[in-house]
Amino acid sequence: MQLTRFALLLGVFFLLPWLALIGLGAYWLWEQNWLYYALGIILANCLLCYRLLSRRSKHARAPLIKPIKISPDPNWPDAAQPAWKEIEQKAESWKTRSDLFADPHAILHLSNEVLTIVARQFHAGSKDPILEFPLPYLLKLIVLVCEDIQHEVLDKIPGSHAVTVGDLRRIKQFIDNVDTLKKGVNVAHSLFNWPGAALGTAHSWLVGKGMNVVAAEVRQRLVNAYIRKLGFYAIQLYSGQLSLDDIAPGDILSQYAQQDIAQADRANTTVEPLRILIIGQVSSGKSSLLNEIFGDIKAAVGRLPVTPEITPYVLEHDGFKKIIVLDSPGYGGLAHNNIPEELKREWDKVDIILFVCHAAQAARQADAEQLNALRGYFQQERKNQTLPVILVAATHIDLLRPVREWQPPYNIQQPQRAKERSIRQACEAIAHDLGLELEQVLPVCMAPDRPAYNIEEGLIPLMREHLQDAKRVLFLRCLRHQQDIGYWRRWRDQIRRSGQIILSLMP
């Protein structure tokens, strides 16, 4: 849009009545000797507004604009938590840089810092951790970011779906022309009516000051949102959360879950169930606990290890969907000192690991070694997954002092009786030896000559309390499984297509 003489003349004729009205008003105030009083009131008002704006800018103020909230994904692996904390610290340190988007070098430097923080957390052993990702996943990341921006624009900017890029360009030209016309009008205004011009200048200055405050806050929130959003997707990328396929982890049975269900003669499950692994030393009470959980004989009970391999059972219980409970061979002792290999293969396939510890025996080195090996395995080899929920069943509490006393229930949170104090001390010792919290250790009793204690009223509710954490483990476990399947399927498809191309080129 070009600014023509006709448009300029039209604007002058439009503004002349208003300018005349302002001039006549100022003249009337001058005749009544009120002009200086009016100017003093206007000046005092301007100074008051300036003082309020200055004070507000120096002190903490309520946000003018609703913050853009970006929260971490609850299904992230454990290694993502420290990375997200560093991202939040980085966002705090950069929140005062309102000119970030006007400086290309600054935004590139910041982006590199954010990506390096996350990449270093997941690929600490690499010389260039920021490059440790497959190219297709980078393209997927770009698509996701563009989709986010698209939704933000369509949902929050009215008419954005109908405005073309050409419209934006023409609007900008129109605003520039209006600014040019305004400058000419201001010059004429100051010649014919200097009091009104002074008032208009003060008003424009105050409005500009307020607009600058709002604009600065908007820019700060955009910088904060950019850092957090970039960090969020960087964690998705480097932790392996991004998937080239549209999959819903947990909605499809994994291969090992299918085998377990088939072995347990219960093949009518289509959604991935929770998987609980019961482990413990020889004669710790695993088989007795398993029998009490199911309410019937599932495993033989004895002093010798009678479970030669991982044995799956399907459990249906109130408050749970179908659960696969895996009984395992005992470890520890002279003949079973090493951790069975079949037990190690189950570590990344389960969501809850229930340790069974003999409360009346202090020999827990084998349990501590098992748990330390488990933690090291997930820290070094399974950074993209998270450690299963660890719970402990402290068995044989009836053998603690005083041995002849057995009058359950026992309150170990506020122990009063001698038996309660002994049970609490035993649970504290187990928690200390295994590096766990006391809340993760639950005393139980499955003595053959006594009714089972604290299974239905204690152990099952404890597992229910940790159900949300177990579902997070299940999500990551199923995600890795489906990504592995997709990885090898793409290899097969690519090899087949390459072979077809080669055959088509042959004479």
Image (cartoon, rainbow, N blue to C red):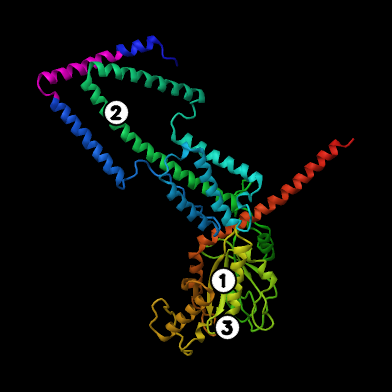
Q: CA distance from mark 3 to mark 2?
A: 81 Å
Between discs 3 and 2, the one toward the N terminus = 2
Which amino acid type corresponds to the residue marked 3 in the rendered image? Ala
The residue tagged 3 is: 363
- SS for callout 2: helix
Question: Is 267 placed left or right of 24 in the picture?
Answer: right
* Residue for point 48% across, 46% down: 227
16 inside magenta stretch: yes
Pick the front one: 385 or 37: 37
Query: Magenta segment range?
Result: 14-35
- Dominant secondary structure (helix, strand or loop) of the stretch shown in magenta: helix
Outermost residue toward the left in this view: 32
Residue 457 at what x, y percent from top left? 47, 72
Amino acid type at circle 2 is Ser
Residue 247 lies, in percent from the top left, at 61, 48
Residue 89 among magenta residues: no
Give amino acid for label 1.
Leu
Query: In this picture, is 322 found above or below 447?
Result: above
Badge nearest the viewer, 2 or 1:
2
Q: In the rendered image, which residue does mark 2 sit on?
A: 204
Q: Residues within 10 Å of mark 1 (few under 14, many from 20)?
A: many
Residue drawn 43% across the image and 80% down it: 410
- Which quadrant would the N terminus be assigned to in this image? top left
